[in-house]
Image: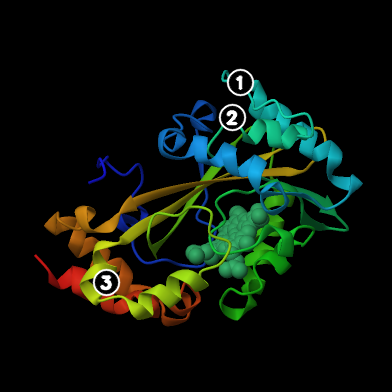
C-alpha cells in the first residue's frame, strides 16, 4: 500500500481540457519551488539521466549551446542543492539534475522557436530523439487540427515575452500505472485492452504537467520547464465533489481533444470508477 499525499495540483477543477495557452504569471520565487516531485522522483530521474542519457538528453546543434548554458545558469542560480557531477554532463544536464522538472530550451531561429536542447526524463508520450530541433509547429503537429493555430499563438507569445515574468500553465491526463518516463503510450493502451475493468480502474493515475515559461535575457531564448505530478486517481475521486468535477471535466472535453489524448482507451475504466461509490 503506497503512502497517499495530497496531490499538488488538480487542474480538472478548472473545467474541460481546451487547446489554449491559458498562461498566468506567477511569483518568481515560486518558479521551481517547492519542488513537490523531488521526493517521489528526483532519485529515479538522476539514475535515468545516467543510464539512458541518449534518450533523455539532446542538443540540436551548436546554435543552441549559448541558450542552453544561459538556461542552466538561471536554474543553478536559484538552486542550493548540488548537481550530479558527471564529467560528460552539459550545463543543462547539471541544472536538470537538481530539480524534478524537465528543461526544454526553445531557441529563436528564422522567426520560429525551435527545441534546441533539452533534458527530458518524463515525456508525456513523446520522444525527445524524434523531436529535438523541431519548431513549435512540428512539436504540436499531432494535436487536433495539426495544432497550427495554437503553435503560431505560442510562437507570438514567446517572441513578445519580456524578461522577468514567469508564466505557468497546466495540462492533465490519466494513465495506467505510475510511470513517468513514458516516451510512448502504446504499452499502456495495450495493457488496458487486456486488464479486467476493475483492475484497470484501480491502477489509474492522474498525470498533471506543470509547465513554466521564462525568457532568457542574453540569448532571447525561452526556457520551458515541465514538472510531472502523478497521483492515484481512485482516492481523489472518493470525495463526492471531486468526482462530480472530474466527471464534468472529462465529459465536456471536446471529442477531438479526448481522442488526441487517448481517452477512449480509458473510458471503460473511468466509467467504472465514476460509477463506484
Ligand atoms: C505556451 C506554451 C505552450 C502551450 C500553450 C502548449 C500547449 C500544448 C497543448 C495544449 C498540448 C496538448 C497536450 C494535452 O493537453 O495533452 C501540447 C502538447 C505537446 N507540447 Fe506543447 N505547448 C507549449 C509549449 C511547448 C513547448 C515549448 C514544447 C517543447 C518542448 C512543447 C511540446 C509539446 C509536445 C511534444 C506535445 C505532445 C505532442 C504529441 O502528442 O505528440 N510544447 N502542448
Q: CA distance from mark 3 to mark 1?
A: 41 Å
Q: CA distance from mark 3 to mark 2?
A: 36 Å
Left or right, 185 with reference to 59: left
- The C terminus appears in which quarter of the rendering? bottom left
Q: Quadrant of residue 136?
A: bottom right
Left or right, 28 with reference to 118: left
Query: Residue 273: percent from the left, percent from the top?
Result: 20, 68
Crowd band around label 1 with a 10 angstrom C-alpha radius: few (<14), some (14–19), many (20+) = few
| Disc 2 element | loop
Q: Earlier in the sequence, mark 3 or mark 1?
A: 1
Query: Residue 100: percent from the left, percent from the top?
Result: 52, 38
Number of on-image labels: 3
The residue at which mark 2 appears reads as 98
Query: Are discs 3 and 2 less than 8 Å apart at CB?
Result: no
Mark 2 close to ligand 1, CB under 8 Å? no
Q: Earlier in the sequence, mark 3 or mark 2?
A: 2
Crowd band around label 2 with a 10 angstrom C-alpha radius: few (<14), some (14–19), many (20+) = many
Query: Are discs 1 and 2 less than 8 Å apart at CB?
Result: yes
The residue at which mark 3 appears reads as 270
Q: Quadrant of ligand 1?
A: bottom right
Query: Residue 152: percent from the left, percent from the top?
Result: 69, 65
| Disc 3 element | helix
Question: In the rendered view, would you say 253 is above or below 219?
Answer: below
Q: Nearer the viewer, mark 3 or mark 1?
A: 1
Residue 147 visible in the displayed image: yes
Amino acid at each position: 500500500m503506497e503512502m497517499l499525499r495530497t496531490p499538488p495540483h488538480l487542474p480538472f477543477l478548472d473545467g474541460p481540457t481546451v487547446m489554449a495557452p491559458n498562461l498566468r504569471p506567477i511569483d518568481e520565487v515560486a518558479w521551481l519551488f517547492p519542488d513537490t516531485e523531488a521526493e517521489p522522483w528526483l532519485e529515479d530521474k538522476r539514475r535515468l539521466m545516467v543510464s539512458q542519457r541518449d534518450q533523455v538528453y539532446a542538443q540540436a546543434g551548436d546554435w543552441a549551446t549559448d541558450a542552453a548554458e544561459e538556461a542552466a545558469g538561471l536554474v543553478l542560480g536559484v538552486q542550493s542543492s548540488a548537481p550530479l557531477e558527471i564529467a560528460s554532463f552539459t550545463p543543462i544536464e547539471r541544472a536538470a539534475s537538481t530539480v524534478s522538472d524537465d528543461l526544454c530550451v526553445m531557441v529563436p531561429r528564422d522567426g520560429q522557436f525551435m527545441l534546441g536542447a533539452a533534458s527530458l526524463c518524463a515525456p508525456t508520450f513523446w520522444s525527445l530523439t524524434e523531436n529535438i530541433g523541431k519548431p513549435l509547429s512540428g512539436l504540436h503537429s499531432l494535436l487536433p487540427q495539426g495544432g497550427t493555430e495554437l503553435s503560431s499563438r505560442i510562437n507570438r507569445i514567446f517572441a513578445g515575452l519580456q524578461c522577468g515574468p514567469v508564466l505557468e500553465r497546466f495540462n492533465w491526463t490519466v494513465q495506467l500505472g505510475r510511470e513517468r518516463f513514458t516516451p510512448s503510450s502504446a504499452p499502456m493502451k495495450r495493457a488496458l485492452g487486456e486488464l479486467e475493468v476493475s483492475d484497470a480502474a484501480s491502477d489509474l493515475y492522474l498525470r498533471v504537467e506543470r509547465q513554466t515559461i521564462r525568457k532568457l535575457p542574453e540569448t532571447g531564448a525561452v526556457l520551458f520547464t515541465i514538472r510531472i505530478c502523478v497521483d492515484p486517481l481512485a482516492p481523489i475521486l472518493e470525495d463526492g465533489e471531486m468526482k462530480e468535477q472530474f466527471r464534468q471535466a472529462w465529459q465536456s472535453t471536446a471529442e477531438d481533444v479526448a481522442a488526441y489524448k487517448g481517452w477512449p482507451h480509458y473510458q471503460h475504466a473511468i466509467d467504472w470508477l465514476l460509477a463506484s461509490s
